[in-house]
Amino acid sequence: MAKLWGVKDGPRPNNQSGPPLEVTMAELVEVFRDVAAQWLGTEPPSITPEQALSDWPRYTVAETEATDSANAKFPQPGFYLMGGLAPSHAEGMIEAHRTKVAERMVVKPEELQEKIRDEAAKYSECGDAYFGGVYWHEPDETGCNWSISSIRGRDWSGCLDRLGPFAARLRSRYNVPNPAKGISYRDCQVAIEAIPEKHGDKHEFVASWLIVKDGQVRKFGSTIGTYPNPGEALVAGEALAVQDVDQGYKDAWLR
């Protein structure tokens, strides 16, 4: 688990205010995706050591651990200054996010596909309709994090009109898990993500990965080909990332 600390003006060790707020790495990345994160090192920081100790914490500092999945925003363990966010503001953002997420049940994409197929069976317009997979994306302005990759059929437009209100209710009630994965391999941390791409009237997926060793980003990579679902993309991405690590030790850019 990552932690959010409040930090006061003034020197260590009395400038850190606790207890910290524990957050998941997924929450840290999603809630603060528009906030600059400045790495400060692996020791508890002093933001303004030359100033007198303030009465209240003024800065938000995120602490990540080696067991947290590495990613582009937080590529190494340690302490990060979260822009100019006051601790009360940061805690409010986390609370608002958790409230929004709690209003939606997290279910497997297959469960949503089954609900959609069952509803479509009620309407003649959807008699020959084919529905593509449910895929994950970053939460939109409503907080929903999934969409349907495609819909086909002789009267696909009429079917879509019929299903519109039902789909809106599903999107307001359910979210799907983020298809991302973190592994440790040969003293490296590897973060893998499945990313949707639109191809014609459907979505396919590429995998990207980030390799971190000794607190430093060593390589970014991505698949050239695309995959029909995020699960296959993650499997392919993991295999290619492992190959990159092995090649890195062979070529001595990892050691």
Image (cartoon, rainbow, N blue to C red):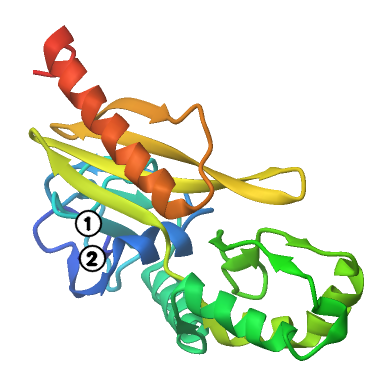
Indicate whether 59 appears above or below 251. Answer: below
Given contact means CB atoms under 8 Å apart, are the residues at marks 1 and 2 in contact? yes
- Which residue bears the numbered disc 2? 3
Q: Residues within 10 Å of mark 2 (few under 14, many from 20)?
A: some
Residue 206 position, x and y percent, is 50, 39
- Residue at 29%, 67% in the rendered image: 24
Left/right of residue 254 with respect to residue 106 in the rendered view: left
- Residue at 72%, 86% in the rendered image: 121
Q: In the rendered view of the protein, which quadrant contains the C terminus? A: top left
- Which residue bears the numbered disc 1? 63
- Residue at 46%, 61% in the rendered image: 30
Residue 150 in sight:
yes
Residue 126 position, x and y percent, is 81, 77
SS at mark 2 in the image: strand
Identify the amino acid type marked 2. Answer: Lys
Dot placed on the residue nearer the N-terminal end, 1 or 2 = 2
Left/right of residue 19 with respect to residue 135 in the rendered view: left
Residue 148 position, x and y percent, is 66, 65
Q: How crowded is mark 1: few (under 14 residues within 10 Å), some or many (20 or more)?
A: many
